[in-house]
Image: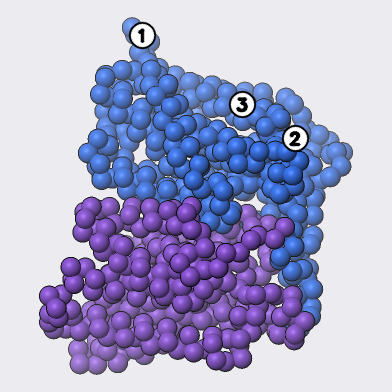
Chain colours: A blue, B purple
């Protein structure tokens, strides 16, 4: 087993892809192809159930692309990501209901609240070591859920319902299932594109550098704390908009939607797809959200299977099924001794 | 007041028992064993299965039966801990922290939903329910089972402390925690010591699981999640990697929770505990007893 350690961490794709298949997968038109598939899907199957499933899947893609900024680009493990979605969903739901506004006008408030949430969670914790960070975000996720469960403004355990739709002008209602699906797809596509572009920006390079070696990044003049905080805030905004779409889609929000299981599922989408590669993450999110619909009979075992898959992927292919090009493994910390040597000597 | 102190002491001794496993594993291989709370849950379910297969137990024998079942459960959860280490964590030793953490989340998930698939997702009633006379001491209502469970916890912790401080394996554990490479050069079989650490930590969590099942009377497959988080909090409060610190941290967290629930209302109990965790991690990440460690680059 121990021989695996060296090989699994080695970069698998250091040279440009040569086969026709990989060229196809790396092609720039792939995003358009995916958008085309998403747009044409309702022409193939448009039952209310299918539209519901597809809209949910699209929202899940948005969440996964947001978590990918935090975990994939910047290497910060966030186990309470669903809290940002909760903040977005509750903010938009409460404001829209209180002032009887269409949900679309709550966007500024959602933006402000999620940025605030990102700052509140990120500012005190981002100086921590990575494993502490993971558990603190988990604690924050639980705090958010329990708070929503206990406050009266959030409707307590039953949550808020009867949230107004996105927008309604005369007879044209964005809330009808097919229209809402297209609106969701357009918004999600915009966010996924933005996340991918962010990953290639100067900031995105800084994030990757921090992920690979934080100390070296600091030495090179990157303000690592600020860069990490930015990753957190961007992740929070993506999650908040996921929450807004979620509230619009279901017209109801309740604390049960924001349990740890949901955070873990988003994380699985990011990890299985390939941390840092937006295309892989989108596919991972689609698989995670659509697979249970296809395998209804195996419902009892699907989370078990997800958990085992997570272990297997980390042990045998830690870069995910479709990692980003030029993936470089994190440098080993010198305080962890060479595992191969350790096993050999003790045998 | 004295009631709150007693409640804190009682809950705290549970936290301490689970925090020990967290802290020992972290101290030795710097691994945050996310699945530790689920081992506790596994222990409760093993106890449940063992007691159910035994059939009806007369009330007079329930303490004895509980002790036997607890030992069985400790053996099995200990073995489960060793297996988890061997299959999931050992191949990743030396891998980036992120990969190891994600694996730990996967292990936790597999345990939770594995038990749920086997035993069903609904809560189960524990076959033995410890009940005893309640008497009052200095104004606190104390029941006999509480005293018995606290005694068991105390005995386990004293045994563990003896093991770590006086035996050669314990010395090996402490030396690996200090410097693994040097321990290797001194002829310590590092892997076997790590295996033992996992066994002991998981066995303690399993014992706590059986005790919790017998005391609260209800078990379910997600019961380990929150308590795992709290045990981690306890370990951090005391200073992670420090065995006495884990015990102290468990008691402190028990007090904090008891008083917090009294002042702010019971529904905020968990929020209070996690707020303490965040406060400690930001202000004093080394905990009460921990020493300041500078991270080497």
Select label 3 or label 1 by which is in front: 3
Select label 3 or label 2 by which is in front: 3
Q: Which mark is residue A194?
A: 3
Q: Secondary structure at mark 3?
A: helix
In this picture, residue A254 sits left or right of residue A14: left
User: Dot 3 falls on which chain?
Assistant: A
Pointer 3: residues within 10 angstroms few (<14), some, or many (20+)? few
Asked if marks 3 and 2 fall on the same chain, the answer is: yes
Disc 2 target residue: A25
Residue located 48% across and 37% down the image: A119
Expressed as whole percent of the image width and height from the top left, the position of residue B87 reads 63, 70
Residue located 73% across and 38% down the image: A221
- Counting residues from the start of the chain, the first of labels 3 and 1 encountered is 1
Expressed as whole percent of the image width and height from the top left, the position of residue A321 reads 69, 48
Expressed as whole percent of the image width and height from the top left, the position of residue A29 reads 72, 25
User: Dot 1 falls on which chain?
Assistant: A
Q: Secondary structure at mark 2?
A: helix
Give the CA distance from mark 3 to mark 1. 28 Å
> Residue A265, can we see it?
no
- Counting residues from the start of the chain, the first of labels 3 and 2 encountered is 2
Expressed as whole percent of the image width and height from the top left, the position of residue A162 reads 26, 28
Q: Which mark is residue A169?
A: 1
Quarter of the view holding residue B45: bottom left
- Counting residues from the start of the chain, the first of labels 2 and 1 encountered is 2
Q: Secondary structure at mark 1?
A: strand
Quarter of the view holding residue A33: top right
Residue located 49% across and 89% down the image: B162
């Amino acid at each position: 087993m121990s021989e695996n350690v060296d090989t699994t961490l080695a970069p698998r794709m250091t040279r440009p892809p040569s086969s026709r298949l990989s060229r196809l997968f790396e092609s720039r038109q792939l995003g358009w192809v995916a958008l085309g598939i998403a747009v044409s899907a309702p022409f193939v199957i448009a039952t209310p159930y299918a539209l519901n499933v597809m809209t949910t899947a699209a929202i899940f893609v948005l969440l996964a692309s947001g978590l990918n900024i935090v975990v994939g680009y910047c290497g910060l493990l966030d186990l309470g990501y669903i809290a940002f979605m909760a903040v977005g969903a509750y903010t938009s739901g409460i404001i829209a209901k209180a002032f009887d506004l269409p949900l679309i006008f709550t966007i500024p408030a959602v933006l402000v609240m999620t940025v605030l949430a990102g700052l509140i969670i990120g500012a005190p914790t981002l100086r921590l070591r990575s494993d502490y960070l993971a558990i603190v975000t988990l604690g924050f996720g639980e705090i958010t859920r329990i708070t929503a469960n206990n406050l009266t403004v959030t409707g307590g355990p039953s949550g808020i319902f009867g949230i107004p739709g996105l927008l309604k002008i005369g007879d044209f209602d964005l809330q009808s299932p097919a229209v809402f699906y297209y609106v969701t797809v357009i918004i999600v596509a915009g966010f996924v594109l933005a996340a991918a572009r962010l990953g290639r920006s100067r900031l995105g390079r800084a994030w990757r550098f921090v992920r690979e070696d934080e100390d070296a990044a600091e030495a090179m003049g990157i303000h690592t704390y600020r860069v990490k905080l930015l990753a957190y805030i961007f992740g929070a905004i993506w999650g908040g908009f996921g929450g807004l779409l979620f509230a619009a889609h279901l017209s109801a929000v309740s604390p049960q939607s924001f349990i740890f299981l949901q955070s873990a599922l988003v994380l699985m989408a990011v990890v299985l797809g390939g941390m840092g590669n937006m295309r892989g993450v989108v596919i991972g999110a689609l698989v995670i959200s659509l697979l249970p619909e296809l395998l209804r009979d195996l419902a009892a075992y699907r989370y078990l299977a997800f958990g085992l898959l997570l272990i297997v992927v980390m042990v045998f292919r830690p870069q995910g099924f479709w990692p980003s090009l030029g993936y470089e493994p994190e440098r080993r910390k010198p305080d962890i001794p060479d595992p191969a040597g350790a096993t050999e000597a003790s045998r | 007041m004295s009631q709150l102190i007693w409640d804190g002491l009682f809950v705290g001794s549970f936290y301490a028992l689970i925090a020990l496993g967290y802290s020992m594993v972290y101290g030795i291989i710097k691994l945050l064993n996310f699945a530790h709370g689920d081992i506790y849950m596994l222990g409760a379910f093993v106890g449940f299965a063992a007691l159910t297969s035994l059939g009806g137990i007369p009330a007079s024998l329930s303490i004895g039966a509980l002790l036997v079942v607890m030992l069985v459960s400790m053996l099995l959860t200990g073995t489960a801990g060793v297996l988890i280490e061997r299959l999931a964590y050992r191949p990743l030793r030396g891998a980036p922290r992120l990969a190891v953490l994600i694996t730990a989340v996967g292990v936790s998930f597999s345990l939770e939903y594995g038990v749920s698939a086997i035993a069903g997702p609904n809560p189960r009633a524990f076959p033995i329910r410890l009940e005893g006379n309640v008497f009052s001491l200095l104004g606190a209502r104390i029941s006999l089972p509480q005293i018995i469970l606290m005694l068991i916890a105390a005995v386990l912790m004293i045994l563990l402390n003896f093991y770590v401080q006086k035996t050669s394996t314990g010395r090996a554990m402490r030396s690996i925690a200090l410097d693994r490479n040097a321990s290797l050069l001194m002829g310590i079989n590092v892997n076997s010591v790590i295996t033992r650490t996992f066994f002991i930590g998981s066995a303690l969590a399993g014992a706590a699981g059986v005790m919790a099942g017998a005391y609260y009377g209800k078990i379910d497959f997600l019961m380990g999640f929150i308590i795992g988080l709290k045990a981690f909090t306890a370990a951090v409060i005391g200073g992670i990697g420090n065995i006495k610190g884990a015990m102290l941290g468990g008691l402190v967290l028990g007090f904090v929770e008891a008083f917090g629930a009294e002042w702010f209302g019971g529904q905020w109990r968990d929020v209070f505990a996690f707020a303490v965790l965040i406060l400690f991690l930001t202000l004093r990440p080394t905990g009460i007893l921990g020493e300041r460690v500078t991270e080497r680059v």
